[in-house]
Image (cartoon, rainbow, N blue to C red):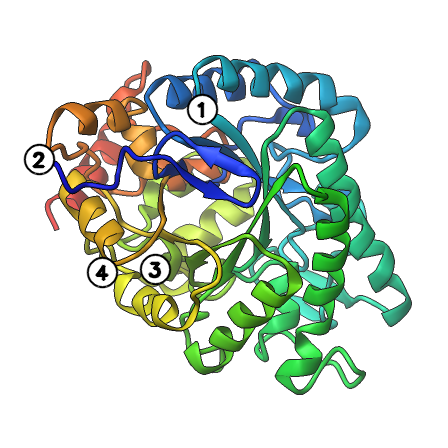
């Protein structure tokens, strides 16, 4: 395809990627004990070897209080050598290496993060379930500095880019959204106030990033439910992020605690999810109430495109990264032709790490992901994996559930 931009180089701040594809920061769940593993290295090396422009390690917590899972990275000096092994492996395959930095806010439990979970406001998180303590005003500067420290650690570990997670209902998003921010001080109320913590974080991030690291920010275009943020406010957030120095925006949506399938689309295979859970009461609770807790949202290719085009019209100064439901070369070319500089994929590259290389050879290339969301269902307990490539035999009940979902 002569007019395709897909395999042309493009830049984010100081970083130039060999093509327009990025492995999005979908949580791998490959870091038992909160440290990088050989499994994490092998996976990202396979994606880099598969031709991607940049692969992004997901959801690294900037502080212990920011951990949602016991198989999640926690940024601290002792893990730098292990991360350096991963970035070296990625670079050897010709790809750039990015890492997503974030804090889960209220989406945790004391048994995981070591403290009563903190968020924009105090309350009760039904999805953990646990009580949550609102961060005090005097704690916010130190929390923002944790992001800056993590950027410096990322540089030391050989990363070319950081992606700051300001979406999906995690800590920055909890400050931005009126659904989770009920503060009465200058960090709550108006949108201008709700953006203050984000501004504080970005000041620390940009100072740490300096002139040699690319800075992307993942943000919500909509929270995905009534009472959450809508485009009128998130457009202002996007424009503020440009002012704050972000060098690219990743346009996403949804709240993992309220509208998880708005982020990922399709249905959550509840039997599969509970099959891997260790906690007996959580297992039975989710099995009984899972369909209510995790309502389905229909999948379609490029499901965020309509909203993302509104941001493309308004945001001209920096690259925009499209993410959401890309599984074919044809649709990727369409998105790029709409003026987006980059595309991100996760499930497509889990299903086929070499998908980018195949797209180079085939104009009609399409990955074989069938959207059962098996990979996501097991991710909360063990590593993310595609059911099509498992070594172990799945129980008959799970096979049946997956087959049913793939026929929808």
Looking at the image, tell me whether mark 1 or mark 2 is earlier in sequence order. Answer: 1
Q: Residue at x 60, y 71 (%)?
A: 240
At 46% from the left edge and 41% from the top edge, which residue is drawn?
11
Write down the quadrant of residue 197 in the picture: bottom right
Task: Please identify, in this view, whether the residue under mark 1 or under mark 3 is nearer the observer.
Answer: 1
- Label 2 sits on a secondary structure element that is loop
Residue hosting label 4: 298
Q: Nearer the viewer, mark 1 or mark 2?
A: 1
The image's mark for residue 95 is: 1
Say few, some or many: other residues with alpha carbon within 10 Å of mark 2 (under 14 / 14 to 19 / 20 or more).
Answer: few
Q: Can you say whether 39 is above or below 250 in the image?
A: above
Q: Earlier in the sequence, mark 1 or mark 3?
A: 1
Under tag 1, what secondary structure?
A: loop
- Please give the name of the residue rendered at 74% of the width and 40% of the height, measured from the top-left corner: 150
- Is 348 in front, or is 283? 348
Distance between the Cα atoms at labels 4 and 1?
A: 33 Å
Quarter of the picture holding the N terminus? top left
Q: CA distance from mark 4 to mark 3?
A: 14 Å
Q: Which residue is mark 2?
A: 364
Q: Are marks 2 and 3 in contact (CB under 8 Å)?
A: no
Name the residue nearer the viewer: 39 or 238: 238
Which residue is under mark 3?
291
> Which numbered disc, 4 or 1, marks the residue closer to the eye?
1
Of labels 2 and 3, earlier in sequence is 3
The answer to which of marks 4 and 2 sits earlier in the sequence is 4
Q: Position of residue 84 (x, y in %)?
A: 65, 18
Measured as percent of width and height from the top left, residue 33 is found at 68, 26
Left or right: 203, with 294 as reference point: right
- Going from N to C along the chain, the mark reached first, 4 or 1, is 1
Q: Nearer the viewer, residue 289 or 44?
A: 44
Q: Residues within 10 Å of mark 3 (few under 14, many from 20)?
A: some
Whole-angstrom CA distance, mark 2 to mark 3, is 36 Å
């Amino acid at each position: 395809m002569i007019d395709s931009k897909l395999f042309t180089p493009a830049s984010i701040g100081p970083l130039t990627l060999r093509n327009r594809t990025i492995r999005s920061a979908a949580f791998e769940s490959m870091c038992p004990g909160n440290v990088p593993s050989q499994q994490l290295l092998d996976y990202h090396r396979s994606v880099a070897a598969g031709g991607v422009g940049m692969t992004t390690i997901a959801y690294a917590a900037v502080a212990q209080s920011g951990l949602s899972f016991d198989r999640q990275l926690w940024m601290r000096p002792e893990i730098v050598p292990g991360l350096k092994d991963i970035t070296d492996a990625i670079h050897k395959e010709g790809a750039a290496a990015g890492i997503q930095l974030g804090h889960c806010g209220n989406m945790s439990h004391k048994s995981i993060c070591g403290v009563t979970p903190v968020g924009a406001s105090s309350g009760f998180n039904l999805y953990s379930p646990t009580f949550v303590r609102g961060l005090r005003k005097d704690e916010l500067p130190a929390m923002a500095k944790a992001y800056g420290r993590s950027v410096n650690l990322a540089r030391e570990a050989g990363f070319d880019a950081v992606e700051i997670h300001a979406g999906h209902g995690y800590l920055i998003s909890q400050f931005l959204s009126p659904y989770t921010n009920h503060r009465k001080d200058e960090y709550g109320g108006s949108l201008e106030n709700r953006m203050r913590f984000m501004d504080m974080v970005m000041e620390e991030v940009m100072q740490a990033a300096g002139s040699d690291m690319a800075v992307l920010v993942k943000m919500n275009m909509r929270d995905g439910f009534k009472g959450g943020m809508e485009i009128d406010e998130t457009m202002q957030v996007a424009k503020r992020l440009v002012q704050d120095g972000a060098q690219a925006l990743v346009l996403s949506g949804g709240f993992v605690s309220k509208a998880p399938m708005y982020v990922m689309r399709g249905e959550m295979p509840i039997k599969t999810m509970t099959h891997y859970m260790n906690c007996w009461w959580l297992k039975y609770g989710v099995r009984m109430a899972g369909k209510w807790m995790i309502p389905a949202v229909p999948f379609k290719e490029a499901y965020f495109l309509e909203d993302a085009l509104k941001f493309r019209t308004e945001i001209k100064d920096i690259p925009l990264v499209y993410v959401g439901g890309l599984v074919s070369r044809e649709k990727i070319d369409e998105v790029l032709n709409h003026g987006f500089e980059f595309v991100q994929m996760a499930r497509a590259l889990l299903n086929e790490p070499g998908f980018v290389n195949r797209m180079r050879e085939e104009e009609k290339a399409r990955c074989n992901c069938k959207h059962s969301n098996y990979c996501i269902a097991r991710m909360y307990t063990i590593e993310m994996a595609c059911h099509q490539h498992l070594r172990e035999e799945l129980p008959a009940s799970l096979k049946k559930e997956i087959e049913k979902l793939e026929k929808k």
